[in-house]
Image (cartoon, helix red, strand yellow):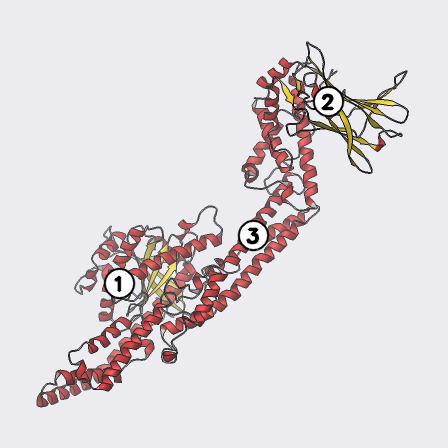
Amino acid sequence: MAPDMPLFAPLRIVFFGPPASGKTQLLRAVAAFAGKGAEEAPIELTHPDGNALKALIPLQMIVDLPGPKAETGEVHFLDCNGRAAARLLEQPEELRRTSARDELRNAIRYADAIVLAVDVMWDVPELRENLRQFQLFLGALEGVRTFDREAGGMPIFLALTKCDALKRPQDSNTQWLSRVTRRQSEVLDHFHDLFDDRANDLAAFEFGSLNLEVKPTAAQMPFGIEDLATSLLAAARANAERTRNSERRLIRTAGGLVSLFAAFFAVFAAMELLGPPSALEKLTADVQSYRDRAAPAEVRFADANFAANRRQVQALIDSPDYEKLPGDLRGYLLAVASEFDRYREYRERFQPPQFSPAEVRTAGEFQKLQTDLETILLPTPEYREAWRETQAVRLHAKWQRDSELLQSSEDQLHGWYRELIRRATQSMLVERPSASWRESATALFQESSQLPYPATEPIPGSPKVNVPRGKPLTYAAVYGYERVASAERDWESTSRKLRDLVQLCEALGMIAPGEGKPSAVLVLPENGDSLRLAGERLERLKAFYPDAMDGTANWNASNFPDPIRQELLRRLRLSVEVGVRHVQRVIRKELPESDTRNDWRMLDERTLNAPELRAWGTFLQKLSQWADQSRGNPVEELSVFLKRERFEWPVEKFALYLPNALRVEKLLPDGSFTVTVTPREGLPRVTLFRDAKPTNRDAQGTVWQFTAPAGTPAITYEPGDAFAVEVALRSADSQFELKWNEGRTNTYRFDRIASEPVLVKIEQPAGLPQRATGVKLTMLSESAAIRVPVLIPALPGVK
């Protein structure tokens, strides 16, 4: 031992629990923390008999002990063999065998602190069975300790191990800590149920010569290890010092006991001369003695003492000679019994379903608690002063203080989340993102990942009362409060939106990509391998932006505010246009120049089913969705279109927009609007529209609406038919005609309706046609409009 080692024996801390309860991992985590900065390395102690099945596996360390003054001390961390511990749990009476030479039993009897390991993942039956065994074990240990040592209060720590197993992949830290807190509460409920003071002589949290603390831990993370190690070492040191002081006091008082025994012998001699007292005299003396030595209310009514003290008073009242007592003594006993009952009734008001500050989650629950604290939870006026130091009244004062702390802490945490939301929202109002913008967003994410207060940390100023529901209030209650939880959800949504924006800007080449990511994965070159380009880009998206591919990330440009939304839309739509041109290039290359119905059918069967074209369909669909355009798969839409043998549109109305700038003189419809379909074999079918009426005028032009006569049959078209649309116009002294005669294919000529027409002047000789820029023709119908899929290219040789 080092020369400056303090003059007291090594501390002995026993880690105890059934097999696979996590005690060994916990011991090593605690020892690793406790041994930080130690001058000497840990020493594995040898087992004296070399037995392979060791009951104890000790670890010797020199550590810095917490306490009123810093000291370095030797600590033995003792790990119990799981099977040996299980045998002792099954037969706790073995602790009372003073002649036994069992190492484990003696280590527990003379330990300075004990850690009971409880696997947080035990189901209810297994948990209750192990807690029941702990109950019997602690009961036996209480009797042994009281007999072995005068010093009371040996610390017992109930360690909830493996709390990391409660964390789910999608959990935030707050959600996981909330789940840990709920599990801790459930374990405590079962523990309290088994150790209920009304059912046995053990209180829920103080066992006479044993004191219990409950600590959630996760050795691998690590979580709760620092708190457990610090509390454990401090409690073990304090217990060892109390024991040594007690032993010294015992020696000093031995002489006094001799005089006390002499006085007893004198009393016994006097009793022999006077004769034994009567039953009434003995009862009277007992009541007077109880009255004269009655402990203060905080001692009599303590949870650990209440039941025994109440039984003692009731035994005096139930005595056969009670009615013979003097009236003042009977009245005294009745008053004492009534006070006990009144206190019990008051103490029970703090039990569920009464909310405590740690359980309040909504504003309504908080308001109810405030009302209850001022009404039903107020101490009875008659006993308010007498009960001032009792556990129940101290619990009331604690809840009042905790309510204030809850409210102020809730304001702080809510404000913290709202400030994060404000900054993230402000970041999204950018016009042109830069490298510094990205750094600012990254810093904000990092800042938000560090909660301002650990959920398991007690709120400063929260009192502790050694009764159920009297633990210091932790920040877990604040994180679970509805307004804070709502603000946290709002922040998660806002931060997710900002992350999506950062990633989308990366993918569109607006900022440099993150480390290891490809540059501008959504920006398509005009040239290159048109067939394989989409597949390559999809693979990059899946590898580096999986959330965008599976829909978890929202890359829709409309999700973001202006002004950046407009730039996102422009870039996404440009990528769609470039992608369409690549697919059209592939189709032109695969389609014969004949441009027949059979050629298109073969294209559908041969080309559109190829993996490369299916990849283009998926890629263009994603781009269109993010650009807030069509959400369909354009390759699949083209395939469905090419399989159709016939097209039919119910005839209703057409709208024709004539811009004022079409010619110098003003042009008006001249009553003739025809749609002509000419089959490959057969006569032309002409559909005539009349009743041209202006429906909307503005400074740039006029919308004219044409209506088909009642009973007009639907327009029908088969691939390969000719298709023509003509509208007669007139000016003051001339006649004109609009003709739609430009299309992309000879097989699907009805696509001409979407192109710009030409304007022809009808005169002798005929005027040259000119392009009618700005004229737009729209079919007004609830059914699908006359249109050709966007992927059909403009083919050469179209007539």
Asked if 427 appears above or below 105 in the picture, the reply is above
SS of the residue at dot 1?
helix
Report how far apart the C-alphas of labels 2 and 3 lie in the structure.
50 Å
Disc 1 residue type?
Answer: Leu
Q: Residue at x 75, y 25 (%)?
A: 755
Q: Disc 1 marks which residue?
A: 138
Q: Quadrant of residue 417?
A: bottom right
The reply to whether the C-beta atoms of the residues labelled 1 and 3 are less than 8 Å apart is no
Seen from the viewer's position, the closer of residues 401 and 163 is: 401
Q: Residues within 10 Å of mark 2 (few under 14, many from 20)?
A: many
Quarter in which the C terminus is drawn: top right
Q: Residue 284: give x, y in percent of width and height.
A: 19, 84
Q: Residue 794: give x, y in percent of width and height.
A: 71, 21
Seen from the viewer's position, the closer of residues 17 and 333 is: 333
Closer to the chain start, of discs 2 and 3, is 3
Disc 3 residue type?
Answer: Asp
Residue 9 lies left or right of residue 97; in this view the side is: right
Q: Residues within 10 Å of mark 3 (few under 14, many from 20)?
A: some
Asked whether residue 28 is in view, the answer is yes
Q: Residue at x 64, y 14 (%)?
A: 597
Q: Disc 3 marks which residue?
A: 490
Disc 2 residue type?
Answer: Arg
Residue 424 lies left or right of residue 709; in this view the side is: left
Q: Disc 2 marks which residue?
A: 752
Report how far apart the C-alphas of labels 2 and 1 lie in the structure.
92 Å
Asked if 238 appears above or below 335 in the picture, the reply is above
Asked if 79 appears above or below 569 in the picture, the reply is below
